[in-house]
Amino acid sequence: MIAPATSPCSRCTEGCCREYTVTVTGLDVYRIARGLGLAPLQFAVVLPRVREYVEGFRLGPGEERFQLALDKQHDGWCVFWMPFGETAGRCGIYAHRPQVCRTYPATLIDGEVARRDDVLCPAGSWGPGSVLASEAWRRRAERQYAELELDAIVNRCWNDADAAPEPPDAVDAYLAWMLAVYAALDGDAATPLDWVHPGPGVLEALARVLDANPPAQRVV
Amino acid sequence: MTAVRTPRDVLWDACRAKTCCRTTRVALTGADLARLVRAFELEPEQFAVAIPADGADEDVPGFLLEPGGAAYELVLRKRGELGPDGAPCTFLVETNDGHAACGAGDERPAVCRAHPGTLRDGRLRVAGGCDCRRWSVLDLGPREHALAAAAAEEEQRHAAFVHAWNDAVGAAAAPRSLEDFCRDAIEACG
């Protein structure tokens, strides 16, 4: 054997990249679209909200909320999954992968980094003396929560403005506005998107960006 | 956050088919091998295969596995059977609407990073292999020049390694394995 195996994922065959619906934030979609030069709907799909804890976005006058998820290949694997033989595979957008994939299988429980109890990772694969209890994993988990918070702020702005036109334009209108917001935030010198903690500076910059980029009012 | 994208990057991303990733035989250097093995934690045989060297490459000799035996070159695997249009590179990902992209990202082989730029006699030129676009050197800039120079330098180091490897194989009594070759190549060039 030549290859290093610093991550238990290297030899794992449980298929988290096939089994899960990978819900993503607007910032995830922005990063992938920017990084690969793709349009969002080439790799993401719009689903009725599947995670109750997210704000989600409206696509019409009703109260129904939607969210974004990575598309799948016909056999259920993530659209960006690269198979290497029958059982092995790797992420094809590793540098741009969604924050939830970076953070998996960790989460924060009462401020402590812990392994989520709903993951597919074989028992003991991350232990003993779990590597998850490191500063790097803490940063990933905190970042995941921070990005969900930004996503909620952005979507709340959209939802409150009652901006969605009637389908079928609603998805396009939402994505165009959302990408413009993150592009402006990315271009804001005060808040490069590689921040670690969503400090007041990031939230202030987002407020500025949302002020300057109001969702269009719905034409009645 | 966003890395600066050159005109070449924009044109490259805009290409849907990535024909060159299906029809080109991508020879790997030890440096390529080292990057891919380390970054993806894959064994070389999971993404690379040794094929008989056809002698077309004058700069890099084929490598031997036994004294007086056949010469090989190490190339990226293709996914599935080779058809008239080739077969997708093992690192190619494709969206459901048919837009292909390199899944190896910045870890991809040096020659792919530089593509379609290549260095010939110290000058930046356009390499063949692309059916989707007729590239011009005007599509390339200083960064592509630097990438092509880096690819050429890694290829030279690899050629020197293969010469030394072949000398050692010629002098040895027992054959060597492909895994030995890969391990030594990574050590020498990585």
Image (cartoon, coloured by chain):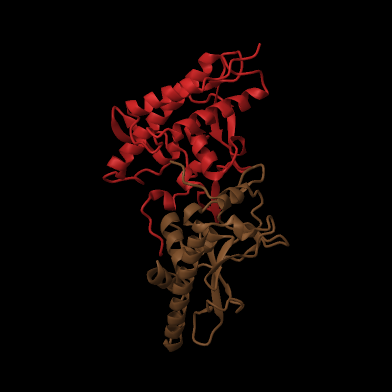
Chain colours: A red, B brown
- Pinpoint residue B39: horizontal percent, then vertical percent: 42, 55
- Pinpoint residue A152: horizontal percent, then vertical percent: 45, 23
On the question of residue B131 being in view, the answer is yes
Task: Name the image quarter holding the N terminus of chain B.
Answer: top left
Instruction: Tell me where residue B116 sits by quadrant.
Output: bottom right
Instruction: Specify whether A133 is left or right of A43.
Output: left
Extreme-right residue of the structure: B84
- Pinpoint residue A191: horizontal percent, then vertical percent: 38, 33
Query: What residue is shown at x 48% (from left), y 66% (from top)?
Result: B149
- Pinpoint residue B42: horizontal percent, then vertical percent: 46, 58
Numbered disc total? 0
Extreme-top residue of the structure: A220
Instruction: Tell me where residue A132 sits by quadrant.
Output: top left
Task: Name the image quarter holding the C terminus of chain B.
Answer: bottom left
Q: Is residue B182 above or below residue A160?
A: below
On the question of residue A107 being in view, the answer is no
